[in-house]
Image: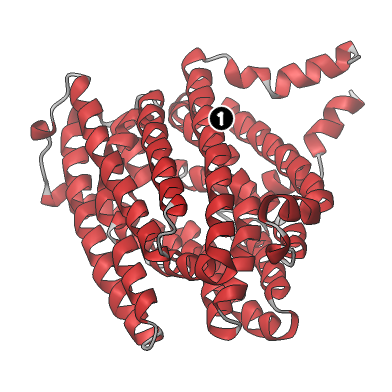
Amino acid sequence: MINYKGENIVKKYFLNLSKNNIIFENVIWLFFDKLFRMGLGLFVGVWVARYLGPKDFGLLNYAKSFILLFSALASLGLQGLVVREIVKNKANQFEILGTSFYMRVFGGISVMFISFISIKLYEPENDILHYLVLIVSGTMVFKASEIISFWFESQVQSKFQVWVENSVFFISAIIKIIFIYYGLPVIMFAWAFLFESFLIAIILFGVYRSKGLKVRDWSFSIYRMKYLLNEGWPLILAGLSIMLYMQIDKIMIGKILGEKEVGLYSVAVQISEVWYFLPTVIASSIFPSLIKLKENNSKLYKRRIEKLFDIMVVLSLIIAISMTFLSHKLIFLLFGGDYIEAGKVLSIHIWAGVFVFLGVLSSKWFLIENLQKFSFYRTAWGGLLNIGLNYLLIPKFGITGSAIATVISQSFSSVFLNAFSKDVRPLFYMQIRALIFYNYIKLIAK
């Protein structure tokens, strides 16, 4: 049984976040979305990995990682900005949506060209990899439809986005199972990714229209574009840096060790990163209310942020400790003996999640405080550190060395680098207090 004191702590730290029913409902919808996609995605992903084997599965993930390196040029750092601007400037929401949409389309087309040319130069002899990169990079164009998802997020109505993405994800899963049944080659799975993004785009526009809203009301503004780019360039650079140190490990493994090792590493990362939906769901749902709270009650805003950091640490530690002990058994159970080497990688890589959870929430703090440039600084330094560590550790320790590099660079960029700037040091103190359970200990001591 929990004593009354324990009950009060739980209520104070967790239940207070659900006082706003709209926010709580939004969290539940997003949680259901990620949980459903995590379960189904893991089931189909395991099946695809077993069917393709480490080499072809590694080849497919090699292509996806290469495209993700440039994905920030397609997203243009607009997600948080679009939500923020609509919340603060509802009268001009159609101009914001229209301008953002055309920016995303242009960014997606640019990524297609950049990624294809780059892979031709980086791996000139690997024709199948060239085709995979070209096909999968087409998803970046259709992701312009995410602008509609941002509108739903700004209205705290993510359930519509959940319906669309889960329906399409289910259809895509069935398609992949059919491909496996008929023994189709790896390139068909690339086409499945492209079809999934296309279908999501079509249905999102349909749902937006069903709400009585019209895309033709959107407008493009050069002034608005300049404003968004001026506000978002640190986020674009930060996004490039994030993708650099989240994807460069697979690319370097592919170049140094080969495609089979990319496959082994990818299944470990797939299990490790599947939990990242938790901080994303919480941060995205609470973000609009934090913007308003900052303007109306700065003290309550700070306390709310601190509570959220505390929750992030508790959740991430529960996951990290559990997965450390279960990693080898889980990999063998899901993927079979061909992937057993991935178990050790998972037991190390999972600890990066503690700092990812803190980093996701801190990125929202940067936006609210209008300190986006620090997002770039910390991720740029983290990316450079990750490249250097991978260069040193992969030849010596193989794919395990890359997992070590990820944990070190993630902790540095998400937390410890914040200590070096006066403007960001309050964030560092909040993160450290969360990591040492300062607020929980303070409550218990009362």
What colour scheme does the image use? secondary structure
- Residue 137 vs 354, above or below: the answer is below
Q: Nearer the viewer, residue 316 or 373?
A: 316
Quarter holding the N terminus? top right
Residue 322 percent across, percent down from the top left: 80, 44
| Quarter occupied by residue 349 | bottom right
Q: Position of residue 17 (x, y in %)?
A: 60, 22
Instruction: Kindly identify the residue that appears in the image at 77 percent across and 46 percent down.
Output: 435
Q: Nearer the viewer, residue 288 or 122?
A: 122
Q: Is residue 75 shown to the viewer in this render?
A: no
Q: Is residue 443 visible?
A: yes
Q: Answer with left or right where residue 165 lies relative to residue 294.
A: left
**Residue in the image at 64% along x and 34% along y:** 308
The residue carrying mark 1 is 301
Q: Residue at x 39, y 75 (%)?
A: 129
Q: Residue at x 75, y 38 (%)?
A: 314
Asked whether 368 or 185 is in front, the reply is: 185
- Give the total of numbered labels: 1
